[in-house]
Amino acid sequence: MLFQKILIANRGEIALRIQRACRELGIPTVAVHSTADATAMHVRLADESVCIGPPAARDSYLNMAAILSAATITGADAVHPGYGFLSENASFAEMVEAHGLTFIGPSSAHIRMMGDKIAAKTAMASLGVPLVPGSPGAVADLDEARAVSARIQYPVLIKAAAGGGGRGMRVAGSEDKLEEAWSQARTEARAAFGNDAVYIEKYLDRPRHIEMQVLADSHGGVVHFGERDCSLQRRHQKVLEEAGSPALDAAARDALGETVTAALMKLGYRNAGTLEFLYQDGQFAFIEMNTRLQVEHPVTEMVCGVDLVREQIRIAAGQRLGYTQADVSFVGHAIECRINAEDPVTFVPDPGRVTAFHAPGGLGVRVDSALYAGYVVPPYYDSLIAKLIVHAPTRAEAIARMRRSLAEFAVLGIKTTLPLHQRIIEDPSFQAGDYTIHWLEHFMAAQAAE
Ligand code: MV4
């Protein structure tokens, strides 16, 4: 018996994704919802549901006391946090365990460690994971910033220790720009995180964002599931992801995979984790680790044939992975398009009533969504409304499958980013796999100029 009942502390497509894994394992689920989500699909499909507060996330999906009360009154014995919201909140993981429940994720100590980007880098460096050249830890003052920058050479990037997702970062192209970048980064870090600790790295000007998916059990078993290329993003919001990366071959994947699994084994890490790397000129450099299930996990599931959420639940219940790296194989290519309720040109959110909904299907097509015809997309939360994932034997066939799936997809009544994806996949340099983290910005600017 894995668990009696799992409370899913999330909403939307990821709440459904977790429910599906629970149902296949025979585990009843409890949905939680805000008053704005009373008619949401994740509530309709759950075995039980509890209203945890008003629409604003801080009063509902971030309300730890309400969520723990919901778990207690329904007799849940485990909590899956999904992504976002409380998924990387170490205090929440601690509180879940203090209530005698199992947190389906890593230990609170590892969540806390990776939440501090300096601690994460220090740990990874000591475990043999390559880093970007930079300061060995926090940089105390402008004099030290000057010394570090002179050593690693300009341009440099000042980053907030409590940051991530791009907040509190400033580039300095030369020494005369350092003082301004330094004070801006400190001020922004203090305002955004209440913590003005910063560190410095060599600024890489045209990297790809490549991340490695790992699972670790509580018996020392650690396996990786290859990489995802998440370079196509806008303002630190990912737009389209692929597994594998068009830039890596099997040998490069195996080598990086070996490095990360060895590191996480030594660290005693448990459950799902993703290590983020910048990749430029054939070199990998670790930047951050995410201690949660990620939005883009389906592309990995498609090429590896693994149910990552099922594995998270089994690991949390103390089970062994039951397979080794040699049992993991990578078949074909997968692409995910994130469909948001947004204007496809300006990215301004466009919540409202979905008047018609038709999802594509057929061989190698997966749609993760909580949408239905008549649903009103609320304005209070993230604008992701669906993930369209395709899998095919080759990347070219995956692109062809994505093209025909996007053409089948109908979401009426609100603006969506479907047309943006249709333009991206027709672009020759996308088709060639020739892109960096800056590609989408340039693509959007070129489209606007046309
Ligand atoms: C960098 C970088 C270039 N050089 N670090 C942005 C968010 C955070 N996760 C790390 N980020 C970056 N770190 C060095 N040394 C460029 C970025 C970056 C970026 C990274 C991944 C995906 C998209 C990005 C968009 C802009 C900047």
Image: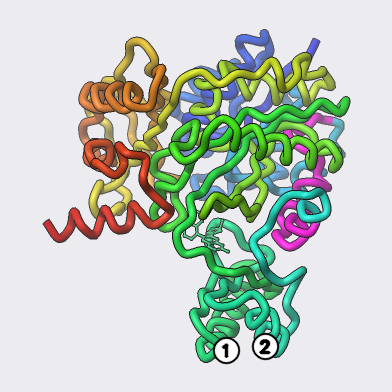
Q: Is residue 213 magenta?
A: no
Task: State which region is magenta.
Answer: 101-122
**Callout 2: SS:** helix
Q: Distance between the residues labelled 1 and 2?
A: 7 Å
Question: Which residue is under mark 2?
Answer: 142
Question: Which residue is under mark 1?
Answer: 179
- Where 222 sits versus 116, above or below? above
Residue 347 is left or right of residue 56, and the answer is left
Give residue 332's position: percent from left, percent from top.
46, 20
Callout 2 environment at 10 Å: few (<14), some (14 to 19), or many (20+)? few
**Callout 1: SS:** helix
Which quadrant, please, contains the N terminus? top right
Amino acid found under the numbered disc labelled 1 = Glu
The answer to whether one can see residue 333 in this image is yes
Amino acid found under the numbered disc labelled 2 = Leu
Check the image and tell me how it is coloured.
rainbow
